[in-house]
Image (tube, grey):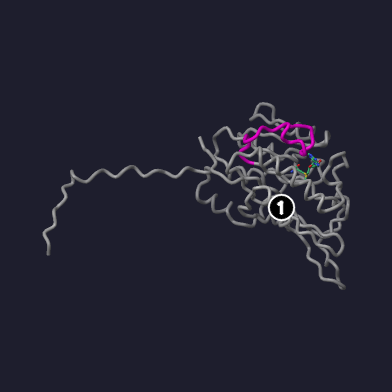
Amino acid sequence: MSPRKRTKAADVPPKPPRRQPPRCNDLDGKRWLQNSISVWSDLRKTAEEQRLKHPAQFPVALAERLIESFLPATGDDCVLDPFCGSGSTLVAAQRRGKRSQGIELSSEYAALARQRLAGDAAPAVIHEASATELTRHVAAESVDLCITSPPYWNILGQKRTADYKTVRHYGNHDGDLAVIADYDAYLEALADVFRQVFDALKPGAHCCINVMDLRKKDRFYPLHSDLARRLETEGYRLDDIVIWNRQAEYNSLRPLGYPAVFRINKVHEFILLMQKPGRLQRK
Ligand SMILES: C[S@@+](CC[C@H](N)C(=O)[O-])C[C@H]1O[C@@H](n2cnc3c(N)ncnc32)[C@H](O)[C@@H]1O
């Protein structure tokens, strides 16, 4: 055996301190795990949210979950909603101490959103305008997170197939994306808005888009995959998808198509987690 030279403790260079990886949020492990499960079934509108007069709001809790998952608890981040409706995203941003900007075409819904926003919390700006002119209102590379739910094509006003409730439309304002009759034209109009959102996002930022698939008579429109594909051609990458399970809200489901044709009762929606490529700079 060759004689080994013994290293004295004093010769061993001290180990450099282990660098902590930068944090993307401030969730503890338990909450991180809960939020990472791909089906969200526990989100409910509060009684107050249910009383608001908007036909298609999502719960503030949904936007809060996305904010706490994608942004750190502290920091001067900006959240955008280009179709802000009753302002749920902006209310969530305020609760999380984040600045926010919303765009809403309808003056009625813009007023409702303003009413919901507390005066002295984090600043929230609502532009009463069309999201097709987003770049006029939102600076390039100024947004840390976008959370939105675009108009669901022109299906509002039809009966909801799952429980036959009539869904009210938004009001048919000029420029309302929900009045475009042709599906491909509707997709292009969405792509035009999300191209502008892309410019407004900082590199690495997410754009979370809540959509559902649609059916008109015997034709099925997989809006979630069509939109994700289309937005990839605008430079986004599809980072992942969350299923928002709303089954608990449907209390009078019927056997759709029975007995002639078997039809699926849709009780879920999608949250597309689109991402602008690049590295998010955290201060
Ligand atoms: C699904 S709703 C959004 C609801 C919102 N997430 C909330 O919780 O209240 C879509 C909204 O987009 C608005 N909208 C439709 N076309 C628009 C456009 N071109 N620009 C801006 N807003 C538009 C509608 O008036 C409607 O309020």
Task: Report the amino acid beneath label 1.
Answer: Arg
Residue under the image location 71 percent in, 49 percent down: 210
Relative to residue 267, is residue 216 drawn left or right? right
Task: Check residue 136 for magenta coloring.
Answer: yes
> Label 1: which residue?
230
Relative to residue 254, is residue 13 drawn left or right? left
Given residues 258 and 51, the one toward you in this image is: 258
Q: What is the magenta range?
A: 126-145
Question: Which corner quadrant holds the N terminus?
Answer: bottom left
- Ligand 1 positioned in quadrant: top right
Where residue 153 appears, as percent x and y from the top left, is: 82, 50
Tell me if residue 181 can be seen. yes
Where residue 76 appears, as percent x and y from the top left, is: 57, 32
Tell me if residue 69 can be seen. no
Residue under the image location 68 percent in, 43 percent down: 147
Task: Check residue 175 for magenta coloring.
Answer: no
Where residue 109 appears, as percent x and y from the top left, is: 80, 36
